[in-house]
Each structure stands twice: as structure tokens, then as C-alpha cells.
Image (cartoon, rainbow, N blue to C red):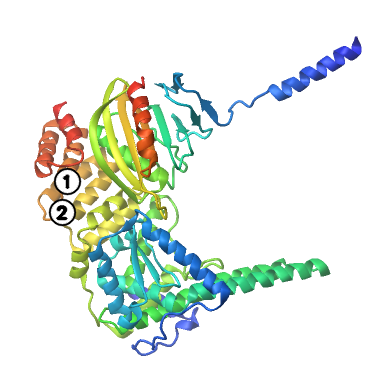
Amino acid sequence: MKRFRKSLASALFATALLGAAPARAGWKLIPAHVAVDLAGIIVTPASDWNQASARPGERGFSWTHDGFDLNRFETFAAVPTGAPLYKERSRRSNPMPKFDSTMLLPDLADFFERSFRLQNNLSDYTVDETRPARFGGHAGLLVRYHYSLPNDELLRQGLVRLAVARGRLFVANFAAPQLHFFNAGLPEAEAMMDSARF
Amino acid sequence: MRWVALFGAALLSVAPVWAAQPAFTRPPYAGAYQPQGTDERGLWMEIGEAERVLRETPGLVRDPRLIEFVRGVLCRTVGRERCASVRTYIVRDNTFNASMSPNGMMIVHTGLLVRLHSEAELAAILGHEFAHFEQRHTLRRMLNMRNGTDIMVWMGLAGAVTNVGTARAQNSIALSFFSFSRANESEADLLSTQFVRASPYRIRGAAVWTRVLDEENADRRERGLRKQRKLAPNLTDTHPTDLQRIAFHAKLEQEVGAVGEDAIETYRAATAAIMPTLLDSLIKGNQFAAANYVIAARGEELGWDGLLTFARGELYRLRGGPRNLATARDLYLNATRMRGTPPENWRGLGLSEMRLGDTAAGRAALTEYLRRSPGARDAASIRLALEN
């Protein structure tokens, strides 16, 4: 009896060690057709996505199919006044622009451009089109842009939707190289942005 | 600039290589160097591949007139014989930089073009880069490092076998790589001034490096750091300090006198098409004080026009906050009365007025923006802002 209890105890101990997952796990699989709440935005993907363990900002999540260099879907939910979009690495030497709820739609386009340029250290970024669009059931803004990374042969394109609701900023951004990946991934990205709710 | 001349005497004593100034004719040109041996040909092959990639990058500026202009300044500086072996590339990059590869590929960053005021200043930089090419500094540095690191490894082995500490000797070889680089930079400075003196241009190296230093100090002041006051380089610096370079060029300018042309107007005309994009990129970088300095220096020396005043307004508006928005509004209003003001000025004015609470003035300015630029890329969102 005593030996059985000892082996049971050691078995339980081993299971506890193996089963104990760390509080913040690594990459996560986001299954298709299941609505997921991303810190305030509810998104329903049409296919499986990979969610990165590293978050782009305090209120953000990044998804990819084939690696961020080939497709990137980012969401930011409920960014409050005074907060940056992407993570601010050094407040002193590299401060990020901060959201302000009094911003108008054109100001939001400028805010996203500066944030995206700084996050990716871009010297080459051009807006193709800016127009009003619905996002999450709210009136918002859509920006189409293209950019390139230094010493990189690929022209990259992006589409971002921004909206302010209850004084907070909500953003969904899809970026991919112009060569095949942007057009291939755009329909699903736009469907996710259309069906998003916050 | 008198204090610079006083520094010059002190600093020149630190660098005896600058002591004698040769006459202002260009040295005879032996032609473009061809790689000898497997290693050098391998290096050329790698650089050639990098050039092939560069040609395909979207970030390359493909305006033939601007490229021809930059090439023209180089040719006037170093002579037709020399510039025939150079291919010029202009790359979208906000940093102040230009470089030259051993195979004749010259890269100029747009961050350089936005910070220079005249052809003479561009000549100073391009002459310096060409001097590196002519003196084969990249190749010599590669060979020097390869020999040096070979020696370091053999030393380490010998030390391990004989149980003798070799770290200090190895460190001194490592530090010699940096001093070799500094010597190369000084050599290039010297040759480049010979080029400029033999060219129609005035020597303007001191002005360029002074502004580079002042811009950096403005940036450091904003970030709460002490000003850069380095009179002598650190052991690990790859270049002489800015103050040394300023002293070197200033002394030369005093000796040579105000000889040669600046060609400010031709520089302005040639860069006029791309300047709005360059200023836009500069403003949207993350250095408010540095961008403010660059714009202000340009305005003070070349005169404030609508484009520069608009650019400064954008800088303040994007910084945000009521005081900055008010400053921006004043700048935009000034720009409306100047020449060369782009339509986006009224966009900035309208957005600033609306954020400051003056809706009527904001709507008027945004309407004017749409009138001046009906095909604007954000016309639809501006109209929506007007409707609400």
C-alpha cells in the first residue's frame, strides 16, 4: 500500500510537471470560422491563422499564414488617448506618436502613417488612397498604401481600417508583398474587417 | 568661424597627415582598378550581386534628370576621366549618407540631398566618396582586417600553447582596425579637397560638417543628452570627429579664399521636383528637433518659401498638442501668403483649425484645399470631415 501511494504520488508529480504550461504560451493556432475576441475586437477568420506570441502593441495582436514577411494581419483594440499604437521601445530616444480622441479622420491617417513608418523604420511609404469606410459597424477610414523596406526587392502593399468608438481607437491592418501575396490575401482580410465587431 | 580656426591649429597637431597641402591639380588617374586574385574577385562578385539587388529595389529613385544632375556634379568635381567609371544610384533613406563601392557603384541617400544647400556642398561629399574609391580603401581595409585577424588567431593559439596571456596584444590589433579606418577617412578628406580645388566649385566642407554637428546637437539636446564636443576620436571611432573635420576644412577655406562657385540656384532647381517628398519623409521620421534644425537651416540660408514654411507647419501639427497646433496654424497662414506653397498647406491649416476649435476657419481652409487639389488622394475623407 505504501509503495503504491509513493508511485501514485510520483506519477501525479510527473503529470503536474509535464502538464504545467507557462502563463503566457508561445504561438497560437487560430482555427477557422471561430469568433475570437482580440482584447476588444471580435474577429471571425475564414481560414486558420497563426498568432504570434510577441504582440505588436499593448492592445494589439499579429496573425500570419506564411510568415510576417509574406502576410501580416494586425489588430489593435480600444487604444486610449495618450497611448501609442505599436509598442514604444524607448520613450526618450524613439517616442511613438500617441492617439488623441479629438483626432479627425484625416488625422488618423497621418497617425497611422507615422506609427507604421516608425515601427518598420521606413523611408519609402506612399498613400495610394484614403476614403471613408465602415469598420466594426462604425464609420471609419480606409487607407491603401505601398512601401518598401531598405535593400529589399519587394514592393509591399497594405490596407488599413481605422475607427474611433467610445473615445478609443480600433485598427485592423493587412500588409503583404505586391507579388502574389497581397491580392491573394486581400479578400479574406477585408471579409474579417467587414465582419469585425467592437 | 574664428573659434574654429583656433581649434584648427590645435587639432591639426593631432593629425600630422594633414600638415602639407599640395597644389590644386588633380593627381593623374590610373584608371579603374581591376580585382587581382581569387579573394578580390570574390569581393567584386559579392558587390556586383548587391548592385543587381539594388537596381531592383522599389526604394531606388529613378528620376533620370536627378541622377544625371548628381552625376554631373561628380564629373565636374573629379573630372571626366574619373567619373566615367562610376554608376550613380539615389536611394530613399532619411539618413545623411553616401557611399562608394570598389566596383564603381556610388550610392547617395535622399537624406543627404535634403540636407545640402548647393552643388559645392554636394561636390565636397561626392569628392570624398570618390577618394575612397580611388585609394581603394574598402579593398585595403578588407585585406588589412584579414591579415590582422589571421595574426590574432595565430597569437591566440601560440598563447594557449605556451600559456601566455595574449588578450592585450590581440586587442591592440583590433583597435588598429579602427585607426586604419580613421586614417583612410583623413586620406579621403585630403584627396577630396584636392579634387574640389581643381574643380569650378568653392570649398564648402566646413559648412556641411558644421550643420551635421549642429543637427546632432539639437537632437541630443531634445533627448536630454550633453552636446557632442569631441575634439579627438575614441579608439573605436571609424571616422575623425566632426570638429576635426570642420577644423580641417575651415583652415583650408581660409588659405584658399572665396574662390569658386556655390551653384545654389542650380541645386535648388534640380532638386525641386523631389524636395517635397524628401521634406515629407524627414518630418515623418522620429526626430523633431533634428528635422526642425534642417528646415530652419535651409530657410535661413536659402530663404523661406511656401514649401519650407508648410513643411515646418506639418512638423508642428504632427507633434500634436494645443501649443504646437497653434504654432502650426500660424506657419500655415504665413505659407498661404508665400510663393511655392503646395495645396496640402490648406489641408494642414484646416485640420489645425478644427483641432483648435475654430470650425468655420477649418472648413474654409479644407474647402480651399479641395478646390486647389480636386484629385487629392484623401479628397473623400476630407469631404466627410467637412460634412460632419
Q: Are marks 1 and 2 in contact (CB under 8 Å)?
A: yes
| Secondary element at tag 1 | helix
Front residue of B194/B110: it is B110
Above or below: residue B329 compared with residue B253: above
Q: Is residue B182 visible?
A: no
**Left or right position of A151 against B176:** left
Could you tell me residue A18's position as x and y percent? 71, 24
Front residue of B100/A183: it is A183
Same chain assignment for discs 1 and 2: yes
Residue type at tag 1: Asn
Q: Chain of mark 1?
A: B
Q: Quadrant of residue B260?
A: bottom left
* Residue furthest right in the image: A2
Instruction: Report the residue at 35% width, 77% height from top.
Output: B250
Instruction: Report the residue at 50% width, 65% height from top.
Output: B46
| Secondary element at tag 2 | helix
* Residue furthest top in the image: A1
Could you tell me residue A15's position as x and y percent? 74, 20
Could you tell me residue B80's position as x and y percent? 30, 81
Above or below: residue B367 compared with residue B343: above
Front residue of B5/B182: it is B182
The label shown at residue B251 is: none
Residue type at tag 2: Gly
Number of other residues with Cα within 10 Å of mark 1, as a class: few under 14, some 14 to 19, many 20 or more: many
The label shown at residue B306 is: 2
* Residue furthest bottom in the image: B23
Q: Quadrant of residue A95?
A: top left
| Quarter placement of the N terminus of chain B | bottom left
Give the CA separation, mark 1 to mark 2: 9 Å
Number of other residues with Cα within 10 Å of mark 2, as a class: few under 14, some 14 to 19, many 20 or more: many
The label shown at residue B345 is: 1
